[in-house]
Image (spheres, grey):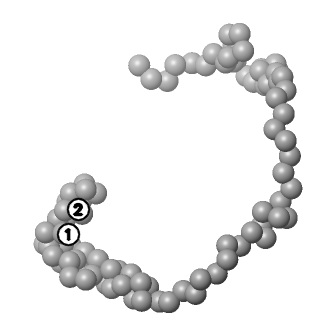
Amino acid sequence: MAVTLEDVDHVAKLARLGLSNDERAALRSDLESILGYVDLLREVEIPATAADTSAAASCPERDDLVAASDTATPVLAVAPRVEAEGRFFRVPRVLD
């Protein structure tokens, strides 16, 4: 696939890259090479196969159970200089 310098400029603008003329030419060449490999992959014939379900069969599942949990108490017991406000943690402000 042919890649123009305008294509390179468009990609560079999207990526917010400032490119010199030499870098533009090198990137154009690299993009053409990459897209050439993609075209080769499109030509590969892949036989139709059934989806692999063996991983799901060997992975036991469990029911989701709703249970009460109190994570604040044990965490606050070992946390240095952290205050609790109800069931939330109060931490120092880091942004204005």
- What SS does tag 1 mark? helix
> Image quadrant of residue 64?
top right
Quarter of the image for the C terminus: give it.
Answer: top left
Pointer 1 local density, CA inside 10 Å: few below 14, some 14–19, many at least 20: many
Which residue matches tag 2? Answer: 12
> Image quadrant of residue 73?
top right
> Image quadrant of residue 82?
top right
For residue 8, which numbered disc appears in the image?
A: 1
Residue depicted at x 45% and y 23%: 95
Amino acid type indicated by mark 1: Val
Q: CA distance from mark 1 to mark 2?
A: 6 Å
- Would you say the residues marked 1 and 2 are in contact, meaning their CB atoms lie under 8 Å apart? yes
Residue depicted at x 84% and y 22%: 68
- What SS does tag 2 mark? helix
Is residue 92 something one can see in this rendering?
yes
Question: Looking at the picture, how far across and down is residue 70, in whole percent?
Answer: 82, 21
Q: Is residue 96 above or below residue 54?
A: above
Residue depicted at x 33% and y 85%: 36
